[in-house]
Amino acid sequence: MKEAEVNRCQIQNWYPKFRSITIRTRFHMLPESFISYLTDDSGPFLLPDSVTNEDAMPNRVHNFEEEDDFQVSEGSDDEADTSSNPQSFPELEIEIMESIETLGGTVLPKLNWSAPKDAAWISPSQNLSCTCFNEIALLFRSSDSLVHDLCNAYDSCSDKVSSRPESFYLALRKWYPSLKPEMEFRCFVKSNELVGISQREVTTFYPILLSEKDLLKGLIEEFFDDKIRLEFESENYTFDVYVTKERRVKLIDFNTWCGSTLPLMYTWEELDKVHGECDDEFELRIVESRRCVLPGLKTAVPYDYLDVSSGSGWDEVFKKAEEELRNENLDEVA
C-alpha cells in the first residue's frame, strides 16, 4: 500500500467529487492546539471550557430516506486560533456550532479517516450523534480508534515517510436517526473490480437480508459500475454504502485495501485470491442465522466468549440451562 492510496481515503479528499451521492458534510481544519489536546494523556481528562449556550441549539429530526438533495457546499476550512488555551477553543467551537445548526442541530463527527465508534458508550445519546462541541470532544478524547488517524495512519505503507497527515479535519456529517444498520454494506474492490460485499453490522442476524440478498447485490453492483469504478483513483480499496427503503444506494465512506480496514465476513487472504475476471463470482455475504454472528468491533472480549454456534461453549451452556429448566418443571409437576 502507498501513502497516496491512504490519502485518497481521507474524507476531505474524496468528498468534493462524490458529494452528490453521499451524506451532507461540513469540514473544519483543526488547529494544532486541539490535536495536542486530543493526544495529551499526561493529565486528568477535562472537557474544554464552553463559550456557547449549548441548550439553545435545536435538535431536529431528519429522514435520510426521503431526502433527495445531497448537493452541498463545502464547510469552512479556516484554522482556529492556535494561541487559544489548550482547554479552551472559542473560535473553533463557534464555527463548529454554526455548522451543527446548518446541518439541522445533530451531527456525526469523524476525523480524516475514522469515526469514534468505539466511544459511543460514553455519549449521553449512547451513539455517535452530537449536538454540541463538548459532546464531540468527549467522543474524540475517549476513542482509541482515532489514535489510528492521529498517530498511525501510514503504518501499513511501503513508502511511509511520515506518521500523520499534514492537516487534520473535523468532518461533521448530518445525522439521520432513521438509518437501519442492516442496510449498510462494505464493498471490496481489487484491480478496479468488485470482488466482494459484506454486511457491515456483523453482530446481528437480520432475517430481511436473506430474502433480499440477490436484489441488494444487484443494486450495489450497478451503483459501483455507474458511480464509483471510473471515479475513484485507486485500484484496490473498499467503500461502504447504505441502501435506502426506496432502493437507492448512497456512499458512506472509502477505506484502504487491507491495513486497518476490517474485512468483516471475509478474510484478507481469501479476498487477495479473487481475481475478478468474472463479475458473477463475487458474493454478498451476510449473517445467515443467529448462531453465525461475529464479535463486535473492539470489544476486547475473546471470540470464544461470544461464539454461540453449534458445539461452542455457549451452545453447551444454553443446552445445560434448558435441561435444568425442563427438570425443574418436571419436579414442579411431580
Image (tube, rainbow, N blue to C red):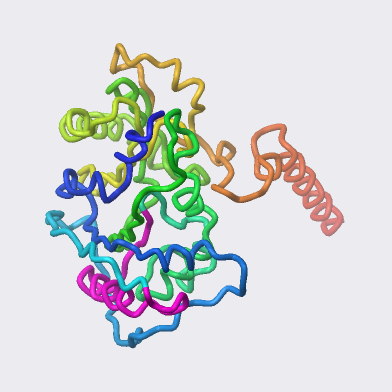
Look at 29% across and 35% down and name the residue there.
216
Q: Is residue 65 left or right of residue 138?
A: left
Please say whether residue 19 is one of the residues in the magenta stretch: no
| Residue 253 position within the rendered picture, expressed as x and y whole percent measured from the top left | 32, 45
Q: Nearer the viewer, residue 257 or 87?
A: 87
Labels in figure, total: 0
Look at 35% across and 74% down and name the residue there.
131
Which residue is most to the top? 277
Please say whether residue 90 is one of the residues in the magenta stretch: yes
Look at 33% across and 85% down and name the residue there.
52
Q: Nearer the viewer, residue 40 or 140?
A: 40
Is residue 161 positioned above or below 52 on the image? above
Quadrant in the picture for residue 109: bottom left
Look at 65% across and 49% down and name the residue there.
300
Is residue 190 positioned above or below 171 on the image? above
Q: Nearer the viewer, residue 51 or 162?
A: 162
Q: Is residue 300 in sight in this rendering?
A: yes
| Residue 254 position within the rendered picture, expressed as x and y whole percent measured from the top left | 32, 41
Q: Nearer the viewer, residue 264 or 30?
A: 30
Name the quadrant of the C terminus.
bottom right
| Residue 327 position within the rendered picture, expressed as x and y whole percent measured from the top left | 83, 50
| Residue 41 position within the rendered picture, expressed as x and y whole percent measured from the top left | 59, 65
Q: Is residue 65 left or right of residue 182?
A: left
Name the quadrant of the N terminus.
top left
Query: What segment carries the magenta color?
Result: 83-111
Q: Is residue 263 in sight in this rendering?
A: no
